[in-house]
């Protein structure tokens, strides 16, 4: 047990920036979180999610013991059952009848043992990961171009670049600390240029000098056009191309078959804007192209990646300071998972499954009975196979596919069909755990030890600073135990994460001799104490030669057979014909303060205040045409299903396009799992699904009543629409329905879980269909419900604050019922700054009083002065006030 308070250096649990965190456990049990000033990824900075990590660590909702069929079981019974069912299934139906579906949120050591068990000991490659939904087009594009899955550059390149092209990346919300780094570099060097390529005007546009509102999937055309332009301007770096690459002519021939006009038609960007961007890129040697899910999550994702890389190879802008294509990773250990070969078509240590020499190396090193010789099933195929009855035992670790896979309802069918489903998770109740035959309680962030690799190949330690809760165990331990019980004890002797890391490091150098990029063999003999003290380091760190160069490919030396890079002759994808029944393109992605399926960020009231409800961003003209009013509800549907979410009308959204966040799921909303609607259409090379491109019809959801409630107990809502968010002291809840409850007081009593002896304070206007009902338990508010025919206008942040306050007199109670703050209590409005809970009304009034810069707002209200993630939104509020003032 750790003595408290002790400060532990660890790494953030969330995104691939991989920020260093200082975690201190106070005497009270609370955990204080600060950025680690010494960590090279963040130098002390954290974003809103990282800063709030301490608020997500309580044990409410945690899975604290193994369960079989929903009943508690001992570890021995559960592990024996998993091992025997896998062993029996393999002996009856062969190794390919079982599968693991794992995650970029596992630590490298967890991932390494899971991959070793499946590929070397079970003898199948049926282990795939949620990275298939995330990074696999980047992996495939890297491998096509470089012969290896290498990210050539470093974060420092973002400081040094004169041009940063952000393609399909909402950096301000998804990699906030890198965004801040670019923003700071731009202040230091105002000549630096930023271009954003995204169909939506996201808050990232705030630092962009140019925003190219590209048509969905226009990226390949754009970069093919750029290649042609570079060649026409004589900007091709002949020396680099001739000496270090092959295939240039074929790629150029395609580029030359397109003129500016055809590129304009395919991208939706005007020829003038195209020319301006192409000229900027042509004349700026120090250019970095940062790309993320707008590139990867597409049926042409791999081609997009190669179209980008082609432009960097053609100009020799790769592997030198301030230059390069830069695929930034999403999950904390997306890179580590790739290093251990966690994808169904990869082998450990960045070796290749299709390479017999590599297979032999790995098998011999592992002293394994077998080695998978053909690629396994990729995520979408894996769940299809389970649905078809071909996968008979499936183990899911650290991912929530019922929410995050395309055609998500078919994943439910797959889990119902599969005879034996094991889920390792930290939470007892997720949309996936409820389909498990066996649930295994995993140790979470702060409770376990291991390493993660961030987007710039920097490996850092996650360290435990909390005791293991209940019966929870680290994922590597769970897999090791099952492997031993399957009869593979000699291959799985591990007693600590350090031993696994040492083996992984040794394998990376085994038979390498400079033929593989991934080499950390300098750490092959690491022992527990050194592992405990391990400082962040960037790979490669080979045993033989200390790395002197932190970037790859400045001097060629690619990992293809002839050590030349390949230009890939990519063609712009054809535009698909539109089924008129589904006239809208559905784009999906992230919001600033939530992480994926909300199993962790949903526990923080501060993070839940930024967006407390699932929503669809719709262009106001489209909304008008469909009869959709702002803040009303909309139904999005297609042949796969329907969802209902709040309409958010905004001209940030282009006509014909809709954006819905991926986060809301069955635990937080009645019917908002957006992946129900996304077709499982995959990229032919990488197998990554096109998660940014579904087709839907959009209609108003004709609610006959709308409700809003704040309540102390977690609600079990009974309404056609509901969405719940945590708030200080309880929950806030949005409701709506077609069928009108007969007795609103009974409805409210039920909702608040108010005992019979608790009296309700109620106001009913049956003529207007307005109802307001509150219940108090002594001086504490148990719940307040506001019902109206139109969306309820009560201030959400004010109402939420009422849960934490004491009601001592009748006047306060009536004020609550009136749904209005007293005159002396201003209404904050929607929360903009999560760190200091500052709302948009407060910012707007400060702006009206003369605070017209983000800095001035910071001085007055503190908003934006901690993590800075909200600075772009603060600027948005100030600008809106300026426009109103000018009108
Ligand atoms: N707050 C927060 N941060 C996160 C996460 C989170 O859940 N929450 N998750 C992490 C993970 S795992 C990942 S993978 C990353 C993802 O990070 P990002 O890729 O930055 O995030 P997304 O919102 O998925 O998508 C980025 C943008 O792609 C745009 N886009 C859609 N279609 C196209 C297209 O055809 N072309 C172009 N050029 N753009 C397009 C979308 O409009 C969107 O703004 O974020 C990581 N960081
Ligand atoms: N429509 C649409 N769908 C998407 C995307 C999109 O942009 N649009 N993005 C895709 C991308 S890029 C990604 S990365 C995925 C993410 O999708 P998921 O991986 O499904 O999302 P998470 O909510 O992160 O799921 C992680 C699960 O692991 C559990 N967990 C947390 N820590 C641990 C641990 O230490 N051990 C174990 N065993 N479990 C743990 C959590 O409780 C949670 O249930 O979603 C993909 N799906
Ligand atoms: S940017 Fe934010 S979420 Fe990402 S690693 Fe850093 S603190 Fe964590
Ligand atoms: Mo991701």
Image: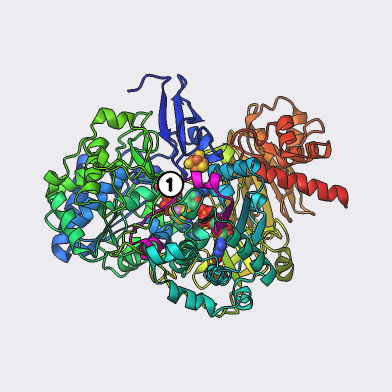
Residue shown at the point (55%, 65%) measured from the top left: 235
Coordinates of residue 575 in the picture (x, y in percent): 55, 77
- Badge 1 density bin: few <14, some 14–19, many ≥20, Cα 10 Å: many
**147 sits to left or right of 873:** left
Residue sitting nearer the eye, 552 or 854: 552
Residue shown at the point (31%, 61%) measured from the top left: 563
Above or below — where is 151 with respect to 449?
below
Residue sitting nearer the eye, 275 or 825: 275
Residue range in magenta is 141-169
Whether residue 278 appears in magenta in the rendering, the answer is: no
Which image quadrant for residue 446? top left
Residue shown at the point (36%, 62%) measured from the top left: 143
Which image quadrant for residue 780? top right
Above or below — where is 313 with respect to 55?
below
Coordinates of residue 57 in the picture (x, y in percent): 45, 34
Per the image, the residue denoted by label 1 is 456
Residue sitting nearer the eye, 850 or 220: 220
Element type where label 1 sits in the image = loop
Q: Is mark 1 within 8 Å of ligand 3?
A: no
Query: How many numbered marks have been drawn onto this rendered protein structure?
Result: 1
**203 sits to left or right of 348:** right
Whether residue 148 appears in magenta in the rendering, the answer is: yes
Which image quadrant for residue 265? bottom right
Residue 63 visible in image: yes
Residue 674 visible in image: no
Coordinates of residue 766 in the picture (x, y in percent): 76, 52
**In the rendered image, which quarter contains the N terminus?**
top left
Residue sitting nearer the eye, 266 or 419: 266
Residue reaching furthest to the front: 239
């Amino acid at each position: 047990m750790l003595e408290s308070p002790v400060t532990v250096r660890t790494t953030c649990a969330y995104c691939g920036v991989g920020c260093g965190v200082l975690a201190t456990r106070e005497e009270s049990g609370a955990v204080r979180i600060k950025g680690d000033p010494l960590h090279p990824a963040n130098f002390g900075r954290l974003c809103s999610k990282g800063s709030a990590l301490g608020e997500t660590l309580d044990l409410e909702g945690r899975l604290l013991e193994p369960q079989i069929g929903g009943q508690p079981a001992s570890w021995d019974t559960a592990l024996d059952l998993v091992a025997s069912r896998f062993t029996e299934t393999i002996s009856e139906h062969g190794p390919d009848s079982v599968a693991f579906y794992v995650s970029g949120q596992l630590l490298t050591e967890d991932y390494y043992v899971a991959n070793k068990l499946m590929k070397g000991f079970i003898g199948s490659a049926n282990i795939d990961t949620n990275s298939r939904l995330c990074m696999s087009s980047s992996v495939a594009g890297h491998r096509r171009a470089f012969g290896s899955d290498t990210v050539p550059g470093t974060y420092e390149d973002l400081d040094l670049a004169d041009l940063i092209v952000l393609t399909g990346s909402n950096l301000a919300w998804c990699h906030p600390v890198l965004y801040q780094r670019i923003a700071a570099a731009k202040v230091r060097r105002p000549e630096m240029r930023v271009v954003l390529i995204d169909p939506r005007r996201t808050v990232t546009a705030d630092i962009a000098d140019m925003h190219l509102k590209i048509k969905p999937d226009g990226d390949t055309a754009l970069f093919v056009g750029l290649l042609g332009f570079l060649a026409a301007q004589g900007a091709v770096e002949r020396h680099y191309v001739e000496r270090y690459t092959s295939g240039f002519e074929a790629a150029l021939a395609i580029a030359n078959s397109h003129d500016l006009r055809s590129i304009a038609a395919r991208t939706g960007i005007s020829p003038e804007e195209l020319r301006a961007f192409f000229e900027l890129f042509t004349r700026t040697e120090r250019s970095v192209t940062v790309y993320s899910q707008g590139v990867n999550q597409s049926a042409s994702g791999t081609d997009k990646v190669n179209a980008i890389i082609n432009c960097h190879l053609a100009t020799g802008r790769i592997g030198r300071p301030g230059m390069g294509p830069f695929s930034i990773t999403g999950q904390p250990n997306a890179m580590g998972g790739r290093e251990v070969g966690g994808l169904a078509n990869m082998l450990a240590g960045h070796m290749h499954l299709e390479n017999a020499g590599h297979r032999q190396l790995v098998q011999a090193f592992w002293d394994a009975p077998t080695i998978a010789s053909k690629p396994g099933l990729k995520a979408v195929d894996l769940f299809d196979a389970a649905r078809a009855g071909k996968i008979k035992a499936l183990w899911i670790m650290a991912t929530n596919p019922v929410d995050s896979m395309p055609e998500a309802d078919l994943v439910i069918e797959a889990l119902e069909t599969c005879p034996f489903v094991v889920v390792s998770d930290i939470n007892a109740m997720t949309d996936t755990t409820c389909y498990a035959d066996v649930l295994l309680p995993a140790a979470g962030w702060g409770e376990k030890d291991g390493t993660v690799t961030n987007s710039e190949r920097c490996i850092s330690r996650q360290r435990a600073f909390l005791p293991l809760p209940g019966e929870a165990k680290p994922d590597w331990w769970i897999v090791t135990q099952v492997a031993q019980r399957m009869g593979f004890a000699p291959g799985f002797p591990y007693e600590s994460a350090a031993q696994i890391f040492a083996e992984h490091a040794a394998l990376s150098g085994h038979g390498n001799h400079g033929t593989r990029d991934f080499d950390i063999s300098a750490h092959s003999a690491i022992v527990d104490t050194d592992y405990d003290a391990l400082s962040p380091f960037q790979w490669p760190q080979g045993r033989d030669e200390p790395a002197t160069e932190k970037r790859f490919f400045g001097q060629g030396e690619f990992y293809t057979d002839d050590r030349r890079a390949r230009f890939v002759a990519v063609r712009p994808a054809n535009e698909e014909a539109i089924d008129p029944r589904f006239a809208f393109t559905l784009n999906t992605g992230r919001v600033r303060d939530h992480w994926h399926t909300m199993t962790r960020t949903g526990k923080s009231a501060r993070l839940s205040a930024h967006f407390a409800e699932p929503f669809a961003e719709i262009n106001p003209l489209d909304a008008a045409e469909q009869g959709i009013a702002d803040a009303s509800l909309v139904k999005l549907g297609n042949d796969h299903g329907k969802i209902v979410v709040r309409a958010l009308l905004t001209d940030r959204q282009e006509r014909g396009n809709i954006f819905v966040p991926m986060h809301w799921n069955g635990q937080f909303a009645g019917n908002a799992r957006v992946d129900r609607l996304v077709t499982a259409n995959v990229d032919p090379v990488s197998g990554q699904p096109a998660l940014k491109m579904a087709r839907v019809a959009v209609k108003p959801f004709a609610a006959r009543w709308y409700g809003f409630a704040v309540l102390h107990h977690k609600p079990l809502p009974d309404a056609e629409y509901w969405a719940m968010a945590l708030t200080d002291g309880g929950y806030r809840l949005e409701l709506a329905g077609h069928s009108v409850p007969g007795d609103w007081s009974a409805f409210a009593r039920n909702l608040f879980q108010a005992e019979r002896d608790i009296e309700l304070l109620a106001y009913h206007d049956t003529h207007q269909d307005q109802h307001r009902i509150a219940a108090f338990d002594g001086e504490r508010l148990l719940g307040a419900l506001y019902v109206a025919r139109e969306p309820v206008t009560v201030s959400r942040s004010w109402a939420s604050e009422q849960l934490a306050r004491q009601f001592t007199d009748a006047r306060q109670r009536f004020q609550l019922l009136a749904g209005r703050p007293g005159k002396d209590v201003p209404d904050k409005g929607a929360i903009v700054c999560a760190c200091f809970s500052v709302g948009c009304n407060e910012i707007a009034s400060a702006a009206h009083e003369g605070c017209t810069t983000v800095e001035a707002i910071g001085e007055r209200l503190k908003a934006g002065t901690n993590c800075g993630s909200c600075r772009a939104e603060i600027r948005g509020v100030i600008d809106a006030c300026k426009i109103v003032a000018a009108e």
